[in-house]
Amino acid sequence: MKKITLVSLLFMVVIIFSGCGEKTETGIEGGKDIDVVMEKGSQTNATTAEGICGIFTKEFVASATGLNITTAETYAIEGVDSSNCRYYIDGKKIAPVITIGKFKNDLEKEKKKYTEHPLFKGWKILKNDAISMDNLVTYNEVGQLNDIFLITGTNEYYRLMLYSFKTIGSNEMVTLALKAEKEIRK
């Protein structure tokens, strides 16, 4: 129980520090939840009008992971040039299972966060040789895969972030990264 509490607390801190805790809006239309895309800042040229949710649809993520993805939600991170999508397995949006984002951000700064910040003590950054694209994979202090960075340029990358260790494992995340890699290279 202590591990679950510690891991949950760690993820909340990660969300706060990464800015992923940005408030998103949803509305009700005919009794059905709808997602409201928040427009903040510019989207990168490589993304569509729908952003990452339009490139990596909930059906794409469901097919790659074997999960029943019920909702995909676009969101923005204040002050970061990115396009992001959260994927949920419940209709209530209690917690995202996975997020995928495309960033124009200082990759060295991102790596430094994992190697120097006290909250990430014991975390490791490795390359996964199964993924042909230049990549970084972060593992928490107990060896669980947390993030996969698919690097497309000097400071351009896609970040696949795992939120729920109970729902999906490392192998499924790598499978998702491999399928995302094929989509990126199209």
Image (tube, helix red, strand yellow):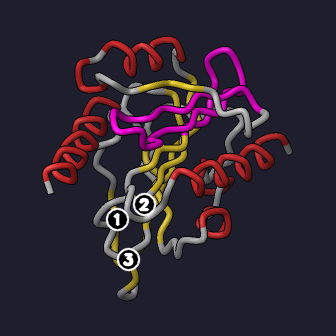
Label 1 belongs to which residue?
26
Upstream in the sequence, badge 1 or badge 3? 1
Question: Where does the image place residue 33, in percent across and percent down from the top left?
Answer: 38, 76
Q: Can you say whether 58 is above or below 131 in the image?
A: below
Label 3 belongs to which residue?
91
Q: Secondary structure at mark 1?
A: strand
| Whole-number angstrom distance, CA of label 2 to CA of label 1 | 5 Å
The span picked out in magenta is 133-159
Return the residue nearer the eye: 127 or 183.
Answer: 127
User: Is 158 inside the magenta-drawn segment?
Assistant: yes
User: What amino acid is found at the position of numbered circle 2 in the picture?
Assistant: Val
Tag 2 near tag 1, CB within 8 Å: yes
| Mark 2 crowd level (few <14, some 14–19, many ≥20, 10 Å Cα) | few
User: Is 114 inside the magenta-drawn segment?
Assistant: no
Upstream in the sequence, badge 3 or badge 2? 2
Return the residue nearer the eye: 116 or 106.
Answer: 116
Which numbered tag is attached to residue 103? none
Label 2 belongs to which residue?
36
